[in-house]
Each structure stands twice: as C-alpha cells, then as structure tokens.
Image (tube, rainbow, N blue to C red):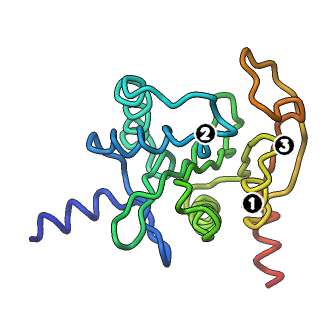
Amino acid sequence: MAGTCDDRAMRVFLETERLVLRRFTESDVDNLVELDSDAEVMRYLDDAPTPRSKVENTILPSFLWYYENFPHYGFWAAQDRDGAFLGWFHFRPSEDAPEGEVELGYRLRKSAWGKGYATEGSLALIELGFREADVQRVTAYTMFVNSGSRRVMEKCGLRHVRTFHEEHENPLPGTEHGEVEYALTRDEWLTARAGG
C-alpha cells in the first residue's frame, strides 16, 4: 500500500479544490487520442484528429521529456477527484521566450467545459510559477474568435497584449481575424493580490 502512495506522490504535480494535475504516463495514449478526436475540442487548433502514431511517437514523448528536465514546467494530465481524465494543462517556456517567461495552455474535454476547471487549473499554475519558479511573465495565446479561452485568460488576470496574423497552409474558420496574446507579469500579479 505504501508503494501506491509513493507512486501517486511522484505523479501528482499539483492539486486544487476539484482537480489533480499529474504527470502523463505511457498509459495515457488513449486519453490523448480521444481528446484530440473531438472536433469541438480541436475547433481552434486543427481541422483533423491527431493520429495515434503522432500521439505515441511525438506528443507523449515530448510531454515526458519535461519531467526529466524541469521541476516546475511541463504538461500535466488533469483529472477530477474521482480520477476521470478531463484533459491537460501546460506551463512551460516557449522556444524563443526570454528567461522568466512561460506560456500557459489548456485543452479540456467538452464535458468539462463551462465548469470553471480551466480557470481553476490555470490560476493554480500561475500562482505556483510566480511563488516558486521565479516566473516573471505568463503568456497565453489563442485565436481571436475563441471567446471561451479568452474569458479564461481574463478571469486569471491576463490582459490582451496584441492581435496578430500568421500565415497558415490550411487556415481554420476564423483565422482571418487573427491570433491574440494575453499576458500577466509578476508585478501585476503581486499588485492585484495586494489589492484584495
């Protein structure tokens, strides 16, 4: 029994009132394939489901790589308190990000939408980043037309920084309106907390 507790302690990264964010494992392939097979979940991301081979050979290995290289950054499976898989969150530096800047992201099952899970998990990651990981700035990106994701960013204290346009080989509906960047600095976060 002690082994089970130890295994769980090693896998759990963060807990909130209703969520457990844990490390991904090889056994999460089906969870990821199912998540990316929902056209509504992928509406602002891709026009086709992610192939199982890509999940197995590219996506999951990249998730697992973070655990060996960063204590506070990576991708985490999100589950409810009953252990049901809800999706994932990421909190990690982008490729060309300045030191101290990390990107926040989330992808949740449609059944988990509208329940505050994205906001709850995001707020917990932001707090951990500013308190423990020496994060100086949190960014998040989505399509301009993705109002649900933008609302989550705003509820977490991030502010709209810019709207920009990128070239896409197969643009999704709404691409013509551009992408948006939201951000929150550590100083802004501290000021907001001090203000109540």
In terms of depth relative to the viewer, which is nearer, 40 or 8? 40
Determine whether label 1 and label 2 are within 8 Å by CB: no
Q: Secondary structure at mark 2?
A: loop
Determine whether label 3 and label 1 are within 8 Å by CB: no
Q: Residue at x 82, y 37 (%)?
A: 179
Q: Secondary structure at mark 1?
A: helix
Give me the C-alpha separation between circle 1 and circle 2.
31 Å
- Count of labels shown? 3
**Residue 42: which numbered mark, if any?**
2
Q: Tell me the kind of residue under disc 2.
A: Met
How many other residues sit within 10 Å of disc 2, few (<14), some (14-19) or many (≥20)? some
Q: Earlier in the sequence, mark 3 or mark 2?
A: 2
Q: Tell me the kind of residue under disc 1.
A: Arg
Q: Residue at x 66, y 39 (%)?
A: 43
Q: Earlier in the sequence, mark 3 or mark 1?
A: 3
- Residue 166 placement (x, y as % from top left): 82, 24
Quadrant of res 95 = top right
Q: Residue at x 43, y 38 (%)?
A: 63
Residue tagged 1: 186
Residue tagged 3: 144
Q: Is residue 161 left or right of residue 49?
A: right
Of labels 1 and 2, the one closer to you: 2
Q: Tell me the kind of residue under disc 3.
A: Phe
- Residue 2 placement (x, y as % from top left): 11, 70
Determine whether label 3 and label 2 are within 8 Å by CB: no
Q: Residue at x 53, y 42 (%)?
A: 38
Q: Is the N terminus in the top left, top right, bottom left or bottom right quadrant? A: bottom left
